[in-house]
Image: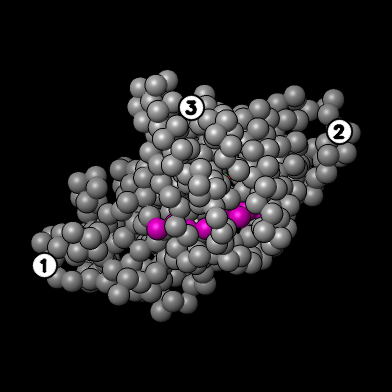
Amino acid sequence: MELKEIINKVFAERFGAEGTIYASAGRINLIGEHTDYNGGFVFPGAIDKVIMAEIRPNDTDTVRVFSIDIDEYVEFGLNEADAPSQSWARYIFGVCREIIKRGGTVKGFDAVFAGNVPLGAGLSSSAALESCFAFALNDLFNGNTIDKFELARIGQSTEHNYCGVNCGIMDQFASVFGKKGHLMRLDCRSGEYEYFPFNPEGYTLVLVDSVVKHELADSPYNKRRASCERVAKRLGIETLRDAEMHMLEAIKSDITAEDYLRAKYVIEEKQRVLDVCDALNAGDYDTVGRCMYATHAGLSHDYEVSCEELDYLNEIARECGVTGSRIMGGGFGGCTINLVKNDLLDKFTATARDRFAARYGHEPKIYEVVISDGARRVE
Ligand code: GLA
């Protein structure tokens, strides 16, 4: 059965009625990692892995939600004091609260949801969940008057205020704005974005999931962000977007070696996103690939968000002659994104499976990336 049919069936069994179905997507990011909260550029796209929900207003003040995947039912009220303890339900509660805080309307509703975005793989299942509900509640209770960027910010504020992750805007932006066949270059300082048709002829984008789980709450993720903010403050600028290497060198002796490395990575990554956009426009995939490897090295050695398994996957890609490969997303586990020539695809995936399994005792999961639409109503 398709996801939609399963959700429809469970909703009817549980609530004896039919609601409206919404979906939103996980995301990939070609390049521009840990740049969003530094006011830099990112280059994500939504993928064909979604969170889907059927929702129906219930004329009460209570939200009643069933998660098919977790097999758990939660009810909560819409006041601040009603926050549920289950982490998955806090995403939905947070979205409701953030809409209300902005003067929007949310009334009680019934919902059933499920998804196929792999959890903990760095594909932003949480952003998909947030933007699915933000989009739906905008449609059901607010006549679609909340603009799309604000929907993304509602998801981001949910992470900050209800989930303990001090994230940037990239994931929720990608999930809300995603468009089939297109990547998006977002300037996280100005909010300006541009759609790039992405159809690299002769190449495939492949994710290799190490199946090592990461947990971003209370995590080194927030510490990375704090490092960047300290350096920006020391430089007297709002974010590292405005920093150049010579400025960083000038204060090197005043900051910790660790903060220096974090900021160095961010400054270099800012330029790489722009270089990749130019290279893509010119059809120069070798340069795209070189930048991806350089990002991996920076994330591993300077930003220190990689792990042994991901470094190993990157090494395997390089040895196989893969054009570009790097850790993707927040880090501390998850997957690598790989730009692979089509005629190398089978050899690379087989080698990655065999060698990774021989060393770590389990195979990585491999997904071909299909760039797809983001948040939407499912007809
Ligand atoms: C996580 C965060 C994003 C972004 C990435 C790293 O996915 O949610 O905001 O910072 O990590 O690029």
**Secondary structure category for the residue under label 3:** helix
Q: Residue furthest front?
A: 343
Q: Nearer the viewer, mark 3 or mark 2?
A: 3
Q: Is residue 287 left or right of residue 110?
A: right
Q: CA distance from mark 3 to mark 2?
A: 32 Å
Q: Dot 1: within a 10 Å radius of its alpha carbon, few (fewer than 14), some, or many (20 or more) residues?
A: few
**Does residue 41 belong to the magenta stretch?**
yes
Work out whether mark 1 precedes mark 2 in sequence or the reverse, and give the earlier one: 1
Q: Are marks 3 and 1 in contact (CB under 8 Å)?
A: no
Identify the residue position indicated by label 2 in the image. 249
Q: Earlier in the sequence, mark 3 or mark 1?
A: 1
Instruction: In this rendered view, identify the residue nearer to me: 252 or 230.
Output: 252
List the residue tagged with mark 1.
16
Return the x and y of residue 148 as percentages of the image width and height: 51, 69
Amino acid type for the residue under numbered disc 2: Glu
Q: Dot 2: what SS?
A: helix
| Three-letter amino acid code at the position of disc 3 | Glu
